[in-house]
Image: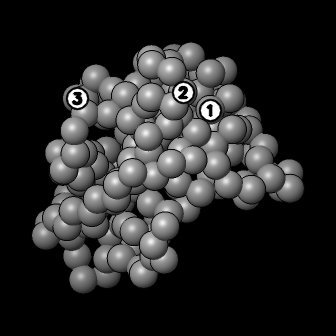
Amino acid sequence: MRADDDQRCGAVDVHYPTEGGARAALVVAGDLRFRRIISEHTTQLPEVADYQPGRFYLRELPAVMAVLATTVPLDLLVIDGYVDLDPQGRPGLGARLHAQSGVPIIGVAKTAYRGATHAVAVRRGQTTRPLFVTAVGIAAADAAAIVDGMAGPYRLPDSLRRVDTLARGLSVTSR
């Protein structure tokens, strides 16, 4: 990876409106800690696969790939969720995304998944509730350090909060 202040890093999220389809959002930063947001992107998909337990990636992956196609390649991508679901490497969304994109992926999950005993717990802000970090293409300890140092004083880094808001189609105050 390049120096911290010479990175194109993205945070991505997908929302499923009640009227159907999916809205994917991407926030791109010019630095590893997401202090300098340089662009925001959204994409609307009219149709998505039905939710299938254990096969969430079938629903989420096309929307993520569509929003990634709206910008130049990234050096790192942060997702809301797990990269892999257990210590044996059962692929989650992040692993499948890495296989398609080749981009190092950091997964940041807000809740513990029963099999993900390998996830690194990161406590940010004043909360005692951890985030659960997994990664591919980057060491898990390095990924956890990046998440710990991401911009924002709260449990959830500012970039993940912002991309969630964009994916939901809510108004966002400009930077």
Q: Nearer the viewer, residue 117 or 79?
A: 79
- The quadrant holding residue 1 is top left
- Residue at the location (86% across, 51% down)? 128
Q: CA distance from mark 2 to mark 1?
A: 10 Å
First reached walking from the N terminus: tag 3 or tag 2: 2
Q: Secondary structure at mark 3?
A: helix
Q: Secondary structure at mark 2?
A: loop
Q: Nearer the viewer, mark 1 or mark 3?
A: 1
Q: Position of residue 56 (x, y in %)?
A: 35, 49
- Residue at the location (53% across, 55% down)? 160
Structure colour scheme: one colour
The kind of residue on which mark 2 rests is Asp
- Residue at the location (40% across, 68% down)? 166
- Residue at the location (37% across, 67% down)? 167
Is residue 69 shown above or below 41? above
| Left or right for 27, reference 86 | left
Task: Give neighbour class at mark 1: few <14, some 14-19, many 20+ (Cα, 10 Å).
Answer: some
The kind of residue on which mark 3 rests is Gln
Is residue 97 shown above or below 128? above
| Left or right for 26, reference 148 | left
Q: Nearer the viewer, mark 3 or mark 2?
A: 2
Identify residue for label 1: 146
Q: Position of residue 131 (x, y in %)?
A: 68, 45
The kind of residue on which mark 1 rests is Ile
Identify residue for label 3: 100
Mark on residue 4? Answer: 2
Q: Nearer the viewer, residue 6 or 108?
A: 6
